[in-house]
C-alpha cells in the first residue's frame, strides 16, 4: 500500500513544494503569463478562480486521491505553475502525474524536465510505484511530444473522455512508465538536465 504524504522535492534549479492557499496570488499571476485559461487543450482557471482551484486540490489531498505542488523556480523564488500526483491508486501502487501547467515564459525550458525528474524519481524510488501514468488531450501536440520524450509508452486513447470548459469533448491519450523502464527514463532525464545546464552556463 502506498503511503503518500506532502513532501518538498528539489533540484538545484527547481522546487516542488506542497500547494497552499498562500499560493493563490502567485498562481494567478503565473497563469496570466500567456493567458493560459484561453488554451483549449488544458484546464487552467482564470485569475479569479484560483482560490477555488487550490481549495479543491486540498480537498482531494485530504481524501488521499491527490498530492498537489506549487512549481517554484529557485532563481527569485518564483511560483510559475503547478502539478500534482492524482488518481492515486494506493492498493496497486500507481499514480498519475497531471494537472500540470507552466507559465508561458517558462515553457520549453528546464522546468518541465526537472519537475518530471523529481516526481518520477520520488514515485519510483521513494513511494515504490509499479507504474506512473501521464494523460493529455489528444490534440495537445506539445504535451504529447514532451511525454513521449520522457520515454513513456502509449497505453491507448479514452475516446470522448471529458467535457472541457468550452463544451467540446476531449479524447484523452494515456501514457505510462513502469518500474522496469525507470532506470532508462532516469538516465535520459539526467542527460537532458546536464545539457540544459551547460547551455545556460
Image: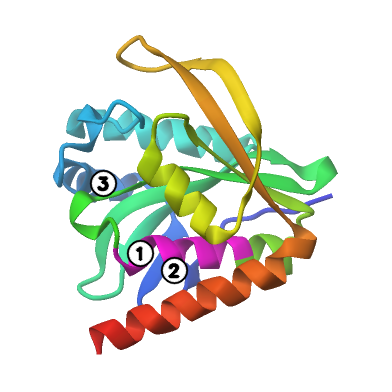
Q: Is residue 26 left or right of residue 21?
A: left
Q: Where in the figure is residue 145, as x and y percent of width and height?
A: 44, 49
Residue 11 position by quadrant: bottom left
Separation of residues labelled 1 and 3 (CA atoms): 16 Å
Q: CA distance from mark 2 to mark 1?
A: 5 Å
Q: Which residue is mark 2?
A: 114
Residue name at image x 24 percent, y 50 percent: 103
Q: Are marks 2 and 1 in contact (CB under 8 Å)?
A: yes
User: Relative to 101, is 106 above or below?
Assistant: below
Q: In the shown orientation, is residue 24 left or right of residue 86? A: left
Label 3 sits on residue: 27
For marks 1 and 3, the one nearer the N-term is 3
Magenta-drawn segment: 109-120
Q: Which mark is residue 177?
A: none
On the image, the x and y values in percent for residue 129 come to: 76, 56
Q: Is residue 30 above or below residue 117?
A: above
Q: In the image, what residue occupies the spot 19% across and 29% down?
A: 48
Amino acid at each position: 500500500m502506498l503511503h503518500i504524504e506532502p513532501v518538498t522535492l528539489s533540484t538545484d534549479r527547481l522546487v516542488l513544494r506542497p500547494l497552499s492557499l498562500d499560493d493563490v496570488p502567485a498562481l494567478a499571476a503565473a497563469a496570466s503569463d500567456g493567458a493560459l485559461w484561453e488554451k483549449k487543450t488544458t484546464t487552467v482557471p482564470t485569475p479569479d478562480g484560483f482560490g477555488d482551484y487550490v481549495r479543491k486540490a486540498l480537498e482531494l489531498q485530504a481524501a488521499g486521491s491527490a498530492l498537489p505542488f506549487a512549481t517554484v523556480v529557485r532563481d527569485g523564488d518564483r511560483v510559475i505553475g503547478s502539478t500534482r500526483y492524482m488518481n492515486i491508486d494506493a492498493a496497486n501502487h500507481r499514480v498519475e502525474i497531471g494537472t500540470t501547467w507552466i507559465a508561458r515564459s517558462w515553457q520549453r525550458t528546464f522546468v518541465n524536465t526537472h519537475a518530471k525528474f523529481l516526481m518520477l524519481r520520488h514515485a519510483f524510488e521513494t513511494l515504490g510505484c509499479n507504474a506512473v501514468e501521464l494523460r493529455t488531450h489528444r490534440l495537445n501536440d506539445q504535451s504529447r511530444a514532451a511525454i513521449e520524450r520522457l520515454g513513456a509508452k502509449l497505453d491507448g486513447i479514452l475516446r470522448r473522455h471529458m467535457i472541457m470548459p468550452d463544451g467540446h469533448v476531449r479524447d484523452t491519450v494515456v501514457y505510462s512508465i513502469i518500474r522496469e523502464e525507470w532506470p532508462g527514463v532516469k538516465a535520459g532525464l539526467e542527460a537532458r538536465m546536464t545539457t540544459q545546464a551547460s547551455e545556460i552556463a
